[in-house]
Image (cartoon, rainbow, N blue to C red):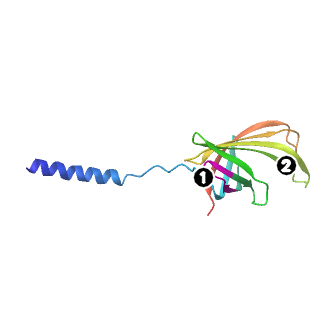
């Protein structure tokens, strides 16, 4: 009789321990609100940018980079990965603009919000020659 009671108590505590185990974060199947995007080059230089998401359905979000006044680009969720492609005008430190001279391809994991950015200068702009560079990407909700 004591063996059955001990087994029942042990099973109860094992169930309680399983119940309080930390759960992994849920995937972000909707992106909405203000996020901080941090990109880091292979050389270790980091920069942060404000991204504003507006959900447009499950697995769909419109994102404006560096302010809601900028035109949005469409982000899509597929196989646990968010993806957005964008074409940018480049603003140089001397005040000049080079229209549609950079393309960005961003991919991040829906659970960790970490991924990569591939930036391609399609023409010379602000001293940068045409070419592609890859950077790491991490998003976090703005506080």
Query: Between residues 3 and 41, which one lies in front from this camera angle?
Result: 3
Is 28 left or right of 132, judged from the image as shown?
A: left
Farthest front residue?
A: 57
Q: How many dots with numbers?
A: 2
Q: Is residue 111 magenta?
A: no
Near mark 2 (Cα within 10 A), the count class, few <14, some 14-19 or many ≥20, is few
Q: Earlier in the sequence, mark 2 or mark 1?
A: 1
Real-space CA distance between mark 2 and mark 1, rounded to the nearest whole angstrom = 28 Å
Q: Secondary structure at mark 1?
A: loop
Q: Position of residue 70 (x, y in %)?
A: 79, 57
Q: Which residues are magenta?
A: 52-61
Magenta portion: prevailing SS class: strand
Q: Position of residue 129 (x, y in %)?
A: 86, 38
Q: Is residue 54 magenta?
A: yes
Query: Between residues 121 and 42, which one lies in front from this camera angle?
Result: 121
Q: Secondary structure at mark 2?
A: strand
Residue for badge 2: 89
Between circles 2 and 1, the one closer to the viewer is 1
Query: Between residues 40 and 142, which one lies in front from this camera angle?
Result: 142
Farthest top residue?
A: 131
Residue for badge 1: 30
Query: Between residues 113 and 30, which one lies in front from this camera angle?
Result: 30
Q: Residue at x 88, y 40 (%)?
A: 124
Near mark 1 (Cα within 10 A), the count class, few <14, some 14-19 or many ≥20, is some
Is 99 left or right of 108, judged from the image as shown?
A: right
Placement of 91 over or under 69, stated as above or below: above
């Amino acid at each position: 009789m004591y063996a059955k009671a001990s087994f029942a108590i042990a099973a109860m505590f094992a169930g309680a321990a399983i119940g309080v185990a930390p759960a992994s974060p849920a995937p972000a199947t909707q992106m909405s609100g203000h996020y901080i995007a941090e990109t880091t080059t292979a050389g270790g230089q980091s920069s942060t940018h404000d991204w504003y998401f507006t959900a447009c359905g499950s697995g769909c979000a419109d994102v404006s980079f560096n302010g809601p006044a900028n035109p949005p680009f469409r982000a899509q969720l597929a196989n646990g990965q968010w993806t957005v492609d964008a074409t940018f005008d480049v603003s140089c430190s001397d005040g000049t603009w080079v229209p549609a001279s950079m393309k960005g391809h961003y991919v991040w994991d829906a659970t960790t919000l970490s991924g990569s950015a591939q930036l391609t200068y399609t023409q010379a702009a602000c001293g940068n020659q045409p070419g592609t560079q890859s950077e790491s990407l991490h998003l976090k909700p703005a506080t």
